[in-house]
Amino acid sequence: MTTPPPPRPDPKPSQRVVVTSPRTRAPRARRPYSGTREINEQSELGAVYMRTLIRAQRRLGLSVCLVACGALGLLPLLFAIEPELGKFRILGLGLPWFLLCVATCPMLLLAGWFYVRQAERSEREFAELVERP
Amino acid sequence: MTSGYAIVAVVVVALGTILVGAYGLRVSRTTSDFYVASRTVSPWWNASAIGGEYLSAASFVGIAGLIFAYGPDMLWFPVGYTAGYLVLLTMVAAPLRRSGAYTLPDFAEARFRSRGVRAVASILALAIGWLYLLPQLEGAGLTLNTVTGAPDWVGALIVTAVVTANVMSGGMRSITFVQAFQYWLKLTAITVPIAFLIVAWQVHGAESLTRPEYPVFRQDTEVSFQRPTTIHADAFISIKGTGEIDGARVTDTVVVLPEGYHRIGAGSEFTFPKDAPVPHLSTMEHNTNEMWSLPMSSGQEFPLYGAYSLIIATFLGTMGLPHVIVRFYTNPNGTAARRTTLIVLGLLSVFYLMPPMYGALGRLYTPELLMTGQTDAVVLVLPTRMIEGIGGQLLGALVAGGAFAAFLSTSSGLVVSLAGVLSQDVLRLGGVRGFRISTVLAGLVPLAMTFVATGMPVADMVGLAFAVAASSLCPLLMLGIWSTRTTTVGAIAGMLAGGVPALTAGLVTMFTDAGNAWYQILLSRPAAWTVPLGFGVMYVVSLLTQRHTPPGVPQTMVKLHAPENLGLDGSGNSQADERS
């Protein structure tokens, strides 16, 4: 009891010091050659920045599109190869009716929501990249 | 089903539209006011406005009619009309808004800096718009004919007159609020009746919709034949009434039709007895309700090709519709444009749940439409048929009013975009006078076309407009936005290579009767071969003409793809003004 415990960092949150960058609130100090300027002056580096963004967005758009529309696009083929599938029933509806009337909407909405989230994220990342001083 | 309430509903909708137009004239805003005000429009308002403008005659009456006649193969129409917005969202929504283009020709010029590309895009936009207006007018004629018994051309004339007058006075279009309201009106007009109809169906004993029997008349049914019709009776059937059968004139007598084909003259009215099997139209596949509910039952040749062609046309065609593109300008920025499109996707999904239910109930309650071929009327006839008395009449009035609202709002949007294209790019007449002349022209051409069209289902006609858009303007947008290598020559060649065959095929199907020739499906569903043609030619010709790359492509690309709030414009000036 008399011997003091070995010194170690105190884990209590109240003891922590909040460290944030003051720059987030302050106006951005732009250095001469930010990504913004590279792009506006059409330098090689600016072109690379833009190409990266366009490629990322194109890949994202095409993959969401291909997955969602491809899944839908398989259905006619499926029903043509295996006509018996059309007689299968889910929730009292024939399978084609269920898939095309009920299941498509949430699927499309989900795909759209995912796309919007990812596209906005990649734009945010792009903004951080080009605005980094 | 002449009904006073329905006439009142149609008149109210037409008058309301005119009044709003006149009111819009008083608060009329200048172009720049409109642009500035647009920045405060929220994605929800914008999305409702797009929905209001997009849900046309095809959506309101056409889809239910096709499903009623041909079964689940036709579900690709609503799915495609919705999924088109997913493609629009993922491929063009944000860049299109960022391009600052107000119309498709504007985009073409902004991206390629060429009057040539702009001219070709203008002509195609005009052709697509007119192809799209035609079924709206046919649908209006059908609605008025079903509700009042007036000849087909009356409805078309009324819609053209109301829309042209309205657009000329400058109202309607500039108000996002009105179009947004239209969406909710249409949704109500289609949802409330179907809710009651389903209850009525349950009360009647929830009869199976897919029994292995041919449709029968549920009651003594009086049927009027609008045009000469060849029907096939599966068993002898005795009918009573006035008209012309197999060339012989009968007046108010009972006629026994033996089994086989019979030709009934235009203007005939006969009463068919209860429980008799419904004779079917000679050109339509005769299915039991069970067969009807299965895929590939529509009796079309090459159903798989037809399905894929329809999928390609509707998925890719949405982005090329002139009246849809305009709405994207009212989004404040690219991010909002994306969110708006996502909401549109949701709004359309909800709406498109309804038409298939009308189609399915129609098999039980309005089978005579399979005999007259007026399948598009199923939405309008069902409420009065299923619910007796004033309730049914009021619901019928609601549907008729909603349908009329659909024709008016879509036609207004189209006529405005077409008048803009006509006055700017074709007639080269500036000012208010030029716009007014263009408006009249934009409305008159499709009205004239309704007199020569062969009366195909409205959703099929809209499908053709989508096919032209998908094979010409879709490659322009997709390759223009995502490929830096697309050249001016490539863009023009691609648009022509895809658009001209699709347009020709569409016109041939609409105005001539190809019958059952093997190539008929290639003409009535052209997208599966014209879309690859358009894309292929645009890409290959662009690669071959790399020396003709338009000037300033890197700057354009920065404008299309960089978020607005970064102040990027690729102009070489680092002090670019902030634009958000």
Image (cartoon, coloured by chain):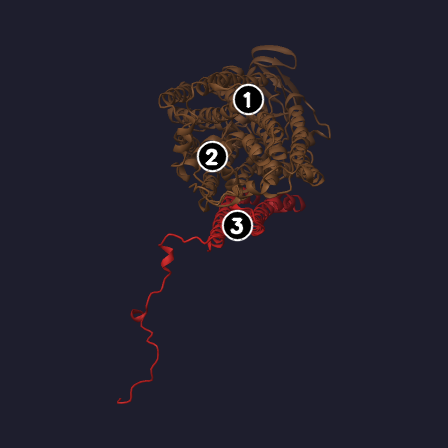
Disc 1 element: helix
Instruction: Give the drawing colour for chain B.
Output: brown
Q: Which chain contains the residue that carries disc 2?
A: B
Residue A122 seen: no
What quarter of the picture does the N terminus of chain A occupy? bottom left
Asked if residue B125 is positioned above or below residue A124 in the image, the reply reads: above
User: What type is the residue that disc 2 sits on?
Assistant: Tyr
Give yes or no for contact between labels 1 and 2 (Cβ–Cβ under 8 Å): no
**How many C-alpha atoms fall within 10 Å of the one at disc 2: few (<14), some, or many (≥20)?**
many
On the image, the x and y values in percent for residue B27 come to: 35, 23
Asked if residue B513 is positioned above or below residue B545 in the image, the reply reads: above
Q: Which residue is mark 1?
A: B422
Looking at the image, which residue sits at the far left?
A2
Q: CA distance from mark 1 to mark 2?
A: 20 Å
Q: CA distance from mark 3 to mark 1?
A: 41 Å
Q: Which residue is mark 3?
A: A38
Q: If you read the primary sequence from the N terminus, does the residue marked by circle 1 or circle 2 appear first?
A: 2
**Is residue B244 found left or right of B23 in the rendered image?**
right
Disc 3 element: helix
Of badges 3 and 1, the one in the foreground is 3
Residue at 45% x, 18% y is: B168
The quadrant holding residue B509 is top right
Instruction: Give the drawing colour for chain A.
Output: red
Q: Which chain contains the residue that carries disc 1?
A: B
User: What type is the residue that disc 1 sits on?
Assistant: Leu
On the image, the x and y values in percent for residue B109 come to: 57, 32
Q: Which chain contains the residue that carries disc 3?
A: A
Query: Which of the two residues, B113 or B34, is positioned nearer the viewer here?
Result: B113
User: What type is the residue that disc 3 sits on?
Assistant: Glu
Q: Which residue is mark 2?
A: B329
Q: CA distance from mark 3 to mark 2?
A: 29 Å
